[in-house]
Image (cartoon, grey):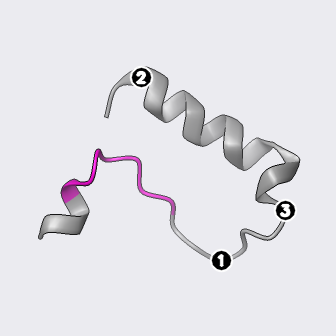
Amino acid sequence: ARPEEIANAALFLASSMSSFVSGSALYADGGNSAVK
């Protein structure tokens, strides 16, 4: 993932939009984990 993609994921987790995200993994790997 590019640095700005990691930053966007971190900003999402720090925002109120992620208030219902609990106990899950957020992968910012450009979809690489989806094709394995």
Q: Residues within 10 Å of mark 3 (few under 14, many from 20)?
A: few
Residue visible at 48% across and 34% down in the picture: 6
In the rendered structure, which segment of residues is drawn in magenta? 26-32
Q: CA distance from mark 2 to mark 1?
A: 24 Å
Direction from residue 4 to residue 9 in the image, left or right: right
- Label 2 crowd bin: few (<14), some (14–19), many (20+), radius 10 Å: few
Mark 3, residue position: 19
Q: Secondary structure at mark 3?
A: loop
Q: Is residue 9 magenta?
A: no
Is there a contact, CB below 8 Å, between mark 3 and mark 1? Answer: no
**In the displayed structure image, the side of residue 6 where residue 23 appears, left or right:** right
Local crowd size for mark 1, using a 10 Å CA cut-off: few (<14), some (14–19), many (≥20): few
Magenta stretch, main secondary structure, is loop
Q: Disc 1 on helix, strand or loop?
A: loop
Please provide percent x and percent y for residue 20: 80, 70
Label whose residue precedes the other's in the sequence (2 or 1): 2
Residue at the spot 65% in from the left edge and 77% down from the top edge: 23
Residue farthest to the bottom, as pictured: 23
Residue that badge 1 annotates: 23
Identified at 40% across, 47% down, the residue is: 28
Q: How many marks?
A: 3
Instruction: Identify the amino acid type marked 3.
Output: Ser
The Cα–Cα distance between marks 3 and 1, rounded to whole angstroms, is 12 Å
Q: Which image quadrant: the C terminus?
A: bottom left
In which quadrant is the N terminus drawn? top left
Residue 11 coordinates in the image, percent (x, y)? 69, 35
Residue 2 appears in which quarter of the rendering? top left
Relative height, residue 1 to residue 33 (above, below): above
The dot on residue 3 is 2
Does residue 36 lie above or below 16 as drawn? below
Secondary structure, mark 2, is: helix
Q: Residue at x 31, y 47 (%)?
A: 29
